[in-house]
Amino acid sequence: MARRMQFNRPTKRRAKAKIRTKKKDPIFVDGQRPRPMYVDYKDVDLLRKLTNRQGKIIGRRKNGCTAASQHAVTKAIKRARFMALMSYTGE
């Protein structure tokens, strides 16, 4: 019988676990939730932080919003665009 040659196989290495810090919701002010959930469409400075340079709305996972506050942010941005407070295309 022929002998098999054994090669050194690279061992599988585990990736280091990243420590994830929880993102803070930009809508909450000092941990206080506005009741009812409402984002003012006239607060253009806050809404510009939640859009990118092309004018697209940043997703919930990137900006740290909860689902309810992201829904309110989306409505506020669309209202601000319609009222010509923000541009549709960005800069």
Image (spheres, helix red, strand yellow):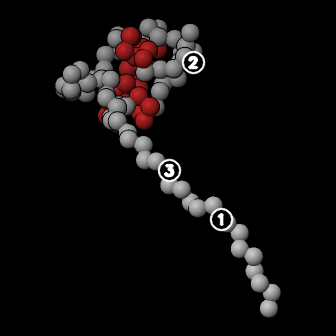
Mark toward the start of the polypeptide (1 vs 3): 1
Q: CA distance from mark 1 to mark 2?
A: 48 Å
Residue that sits furthest to the right in the current view: 2
Q: Give the side of residue 86 with respect to residue 7, left or right.
A: left
Residue at image x 34%, y 11%?
Answer: 43
Q: CA distance from mark 3 to mark 2?
A: 35 Å
Residue at image x 56%, y 60%?
Answer: 12
Number of labels in the image equals 3
Q: Nearer the viewer, mark 3 or mark 2?
A: 3
- Tell me the residue that label 3 is attached to: 15
- Tell me the residue that label 1 is attached to: 9
Residue 79 visible here:
no
Tags 3 and 2 in contact by the CB under 8 Å rule? no
Mark toward the start of the polypeptide (3 vs 2): 3
Q: Give the side of residue 90 with respect to residue 25, left or right.
A: right
Quarter of the view holding residue 47: top left
Q: Amino acid at mark 2?
A: Gln
Mark 1, Cα crowd under 10 Å, few <14 / some 14-19 / many 20+, is few
Give me the disc on residue 54.
Answer: 2
**SS for callout 2:** loop
Q: Nearer the viewer, mark 1 or mark 2?
A: 1
Residue 48: percent from left, percent from top: 44, 14
Residue 1: percent from left, percent from top: 80, 91
Residue at image x 30%, y 23%?
Answer: 27
Residue in front for this viewpoint, 45 or 21: 21
Residue at image x 26%, y 24%?
Answer: 28
